[in-house]
């Protein structure tokens, strides 16, 4: 299961008129821990941001899935509710799950979520879709370089 972290970075951004303005931007990262999220965030910021920056927050999110479409830059968080039967008590239990989807507007976000969930066998509802302030989403990439001080588990020998 993926763990998504919401990260906020404060830095100076050059405006169109040449003035510098301090801004706080939000990113979403897929990472295995807070340390991994912070490390990846620093790599991303060093690459993309000119000048000094400060990581102001890293928090776990309740996002279960991310649906990315290259043609959209806005990110919408949707709440999807579906019902299942509890095996022990035979009562109906409602389960909330949160999906992040890239879309140009709320209607397109709804349509993309519907398309993504069309193979789901249980009935579901989408009670809310809200625009987020995420500037960019960075999923985990297994092709990324492993740091030189770490070894794969299969190479470690117990003593």
Image (cartoon, grey):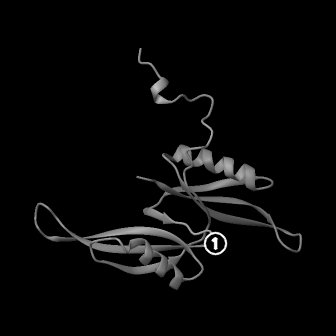
Q: Which residue is mark 1?
A: 73
> Which residue is the extreme one toward the top?
159
Vertical comparison of 49 with 13: above or below: above
Q: Position of residue 51 (x, y in %)?
A: 80, 53
Count residues near mark 1 (Cα–Cα under 10 Å), then give few for <14, some for 14-19, many for 20+: some
- For image coordinates 66% across by 48% down, the residue present is 42
- For image coordinates 52% across by 47% down, the residue present is 34
Q: Is residue 76 left or right of residue 54?
A: left
- For image coordinates 28% across by 71% down, the residue present is 121
Q: Position of residue 147 (x, y in %)?
A: 62, 34
Which of the image's four quarters has the C terminus?
Answer: top left
Q: Nearer the viewer, residue 41 or 20?
A: 41
Q: Nearer the viewer, residue 119 or 82?
A: 119
Q: Position of residue 71 (x, y in %)?
A: 63, 73
Q: How many marks?
A: 1
Vertical comparison of 80 with 46: above or below: below
- For image coordinates 49% across by 46% down, the residue present is 33
Vertical comparison of 142 with 91: above or below: above
């Amino acid at each position: 299961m993926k763990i998504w972290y919401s990260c906020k970075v404060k830095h100076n951004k050059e405006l169109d008129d040449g003035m510098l303005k301090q801004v706080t931007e939000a990113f979403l990262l897929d990472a295995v821990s807070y340390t991994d999220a912070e490390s990846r965030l620093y790599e991303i910021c060093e690459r993309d941001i000119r000048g000094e920056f400060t990581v102001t927050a890293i928090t776990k999110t309740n996002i279960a899935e991310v649906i990315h479409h290259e043609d959209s830059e806005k990110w919408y968080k949707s709440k999807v509710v579906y019902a299942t039967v509890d095996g022990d008590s035979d009562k109906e239990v409602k389960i909330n799950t949160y999906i992040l989807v890239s879309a140009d507007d709320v209607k397109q976000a709804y349509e993309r979520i519907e398309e993504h969930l069309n193979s789901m066998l249980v009935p579901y509802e989408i009670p809310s879709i809200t625009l987020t302030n995420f500037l960019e989403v960075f999923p985990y990439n297994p092709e990324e370089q492993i740091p030189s001080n770490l070894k794969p588990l299969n190479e470690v020998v117990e003593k």
